[in-house]
Image (cartoon, rainbow, N blue to C red):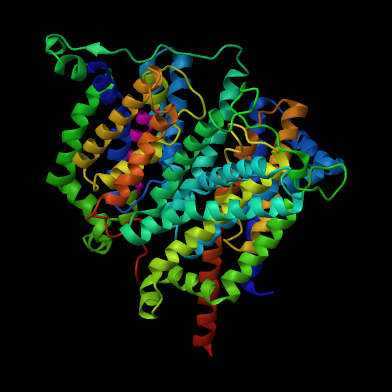
């Protein structure tokens, strides 16, 4: 039981990085539909960086850079050239698959045995990790999960209690007002997507070097889209994203547990499909969405 | 020729050339000579009949998935789930073929299999439209997620009820040759599925541009508010659009199972859904344009595979070429809108001067 909960928290970590990134971007009116590609590039960058340098820290830096580069290409086309966000995302995602697998081959050739790195270690926090139940679940995780504990309140605070947050929220609701106030809508959107790219890169790295220490081109397998869905289901709020990420993390942990324990009466495939079924059910049943008014709409100045 | 069409053809052509050029330059990272590699690509795809026909074999399912995306797109709906609808179509095609083979003349059996596939894919797709119409669910998300559910269903069935008699691999028994779609060029794998695809593309064009239903779908796509005022129920159209879109993608399952693989196996054509979206974008969602864009992507697939076999270039060059072509095509949309603005300005200036 404790094992499942601990695993659930671990699996929700990358989803939370991704969905908070998505919340921020969508609050400015930008759907980051390239998120699947950003995750993949992050996973790839993280692995390559860590393998070649021997340092997981450098791996994460490379993952952040890979995420940023992907996000910047996406943002340039959608923000400045005002092209369709969904369509551009699809193109970037396909290109990301091509780039990862091609350069994997360029760098490593055709390895005989699968390449691995030692994944991020869990760091038990002294004293706190000794608390029954809570300790092993919350305080025996890796560094990225601990960092997540800081990111949640910070993300919430910045979005709702600071002027930067006000600007971000206004950009998605009423970009004309932001423009009239003397700020550049395009620049705000571009920067926020760039930051989202960095976060998405970390999320991707979590899948490659966070716990299995390997990279394959299907390693993300739609998790970017799940983070995208969590942003919707969490009503564009970092706390909503937290709940969403925990639910999906739990679904994934139960899935992994049932697969390894044989699953009993239910087929494995049901558990593999669980997060996706859950997304569909929640998308259908959830009411009263607070969609940012300008979501997906390129900003065009009237003149 | 009208100016817009001319712009479209020139910029699309340039986008394809640029996309391929960038992919070729990336080969330098592998110390391969790009000119030589692409030379192999072009010369080998036209060198023999079999390989040349393969282009159209590969293009066939892409025409269907691209039509599926384009059709919903015309109603301003996003069907990102063509991959899943294709899986559902494949499942129905293979199970009904296995069931019907030998029980009736193959012509009749194939028609029944085709109809069942179309209906099944349509029902699977219309569920997405229904969720959108009834619950205002985001169709982008629902269709995206439905692919993963379809994949799980397919893997489950392949492992259990549909598994081959030997029960060794998660795949079905091969179909009886009577259930194979006939080929029409001897010595190649080119089957009549390609002709079906072309006919369906033309039919979709007629449906969209020559019928009331198509007109309504396009009105809802352009401006759902105006459509509502004109008395068009957009909710019903969401369901119809997804029904048709889903059945189009499912047809790819029929042509792939009965025309090419003659069985169903795990990891079957995993990327035709996303390639279909790219093709629809390249063709500006025009059904006739989709035929040509699919042939281009088919050629990239065949060429990429040959490059891999002949000069040790990884097959991921296919995704690279497709990705770069798509990105440049999107950039060409920007270039076209700039050209259009400049033309408008020039016209205005002319009017003012007069």
Foreground residue among B149 and A58:
B149
B222 relative to A130 in the view: left or right: right
Snapshot quadrant of residue A146: top left
Snapshot quadrant of residue B321: top right
Q: Which quarter of the image is occupied by the C terminus of chain A?
A: bottom left
Snapshot quadrant of residue B39: top right
In this rendering, is residue B173 above or below B258? above
The residue at the point 35 percent across, 79 percent down is B229
Residue B254 position within the rendered picture, expressed as x and y whole percent measured from the top left: 65, 48
Q: Which residues are magenta?
A: A190-204
Q: Residue furthest front?
A: B103
The residue at the point 38 percent across, 22 percent down is A264
A14 relative to B59 in the view: left or right: left
Is residue A25 visible in this depiction of the protein?
Answer: no
Residue A104 position within the rendered picture, expressed as x and y whole percent measured from the top left: 56, 24
Foreground residue among B242 and B154:
B154
Foreground residue among A102 and A273:
A273
**Residue A195 shown in magenta:** yes
In this rendering, is residue B187 above or below A254? below
Foreground residue among B324 and B299:
B299
The prevailing secondary structure element of the residues shown in magenta is helix
Is residue A164 visible in this depiction of the protein?
Answer: yes
The residue at the point 18 percent across, 12 percent down is A125
Residue B42 position within the rendered picture, expressed as x and y whole percent measured from the top left: 79, 42
**Residue B236 shown in magenta:** no
């Amino acid at each position: 039981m404790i094992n499942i909960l601990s695993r659930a928290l671990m699996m929700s970590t990358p989803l939370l990085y991704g969905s908070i990134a998505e919340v921020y971007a969508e609050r400015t009116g930008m759907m980051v539909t390239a998120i699947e590609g950003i995750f993949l590039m992050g996973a790839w960058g993280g692995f390559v960086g860590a393998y070649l340098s021997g340092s997981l820290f450098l791996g994460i830096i490379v993952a952040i850079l890979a995420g940023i580069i992907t996000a910047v290409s996406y943002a340039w086309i959608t923000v400045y050239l005002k092209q369709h966000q969904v369509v551009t995302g699809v193109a970037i995602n396909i290109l990301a698959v091509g780039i990862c697998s091609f350069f994997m081959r360029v760098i490593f050739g055709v390895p005989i045995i699968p390449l691995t790195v030692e994944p991020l270690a869990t760091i038990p926090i002294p004293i706190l990790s000794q608390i029954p139940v809570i300790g092993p679940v919350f305080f025996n995780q890796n560094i990225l999960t601990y960092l997540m504990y800081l990111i949640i309140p910070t993300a919430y605070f910045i979005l709702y209690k600071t002027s930067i947050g006000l600007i971000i929220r206004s950009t998605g609701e009423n970009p004309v007002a932001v423009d009239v106030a003397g700020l550049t809508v395009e620049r705000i959107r571009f920067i926020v997507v760039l930051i989202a790219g960095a976060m998405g890169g970390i999320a991707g790295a979590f899948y490659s070097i966070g716990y299995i220490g390997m990279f394959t081109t299907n390693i993300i397998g739609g998790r970017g889209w799940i983070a995208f869905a969590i942003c919707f289901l969490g009503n564009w709020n970092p706390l909503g994203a937290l709940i969403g990420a925990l639910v999906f993390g739990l679904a994934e942990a139960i899935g992994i547990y049932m697969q390894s324990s044989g699953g009993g009466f239910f087929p494995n495939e049901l558990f593999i499909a669980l997060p996706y079924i859950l997304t569909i059910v929640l998308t259908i049943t959830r009411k009263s969405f607070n969609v940012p008014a300008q979501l997906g709409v390129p900003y065009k100045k009237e003149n | 020729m009208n100016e817009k069409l001319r712009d479209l053809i020139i910029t699309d052509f340039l986008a394809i050339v640029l996309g391929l050029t960038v992919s070729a330059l990336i080969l330098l990272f592998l110390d391969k000579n790009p000119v030589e590699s692409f030379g192999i690509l072009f010369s080998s795809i036209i060198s023999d009949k079999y390989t040349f026909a393969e282009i159209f074999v590969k293009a066939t399912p892409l025409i269907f998935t691209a039509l599926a995306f384009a059709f919903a797109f015309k109603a301003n709906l996003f069907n990102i789930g063509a991959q899943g609808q294709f899986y559902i179509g494949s499942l129905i095609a293979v199970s009904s073929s296995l069931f019907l083979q030998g029980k009736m003349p193959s012509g009749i059996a194939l028609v029944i299999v085709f109809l069942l596939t179309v209906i099944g894919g349509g029902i699977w797709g219309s569920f997405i439209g229904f969720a959108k119409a009834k619950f205002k669910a985001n169709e982008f998300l629902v269709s995206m997620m439905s692919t993963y559910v379809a994949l799980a269903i397919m893997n489950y069935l392949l492992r259990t009820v549909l598994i081959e008699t030997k029960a060794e691999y998660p795949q079905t028994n091969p179909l009886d040759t009577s259930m194979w779609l006939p080929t029409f060029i001897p010595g190649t794998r080119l089957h009549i599925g390609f002709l079906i695809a072309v006919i369906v593309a033309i039919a979709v064009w007629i449906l969209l541009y020559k019928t009331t239903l198509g007109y309504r779908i396009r009105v809802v796509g352009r401006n759902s508010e105006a459509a509502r005022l004109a008395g068009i129920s957009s909710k019903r159209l969401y369901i119809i659009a997804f029904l048709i879109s889903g059945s189009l993608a499912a047809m790819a399952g029929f042509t792939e199972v009965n025309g090419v693989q003659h069985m169903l196996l795990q990891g079957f054509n995993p990327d035709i859904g996303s390639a279909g979206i790219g093709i629809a974008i390249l063709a500006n969602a025009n059904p006739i344009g989709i035929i040509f864009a699919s042939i281009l992507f088919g050629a990239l697939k065949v060429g990429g595979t040959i490059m891999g076999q002949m000069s040790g270039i990884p097959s991921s060059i296919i995704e690279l070429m497709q990705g770069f072509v798509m990105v440049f095509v999107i950039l060409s949309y920007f270039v076209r809108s700039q050209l259009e603005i400049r033309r408008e300005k020039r016209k205005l200036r002319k009017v003012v001067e007069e």
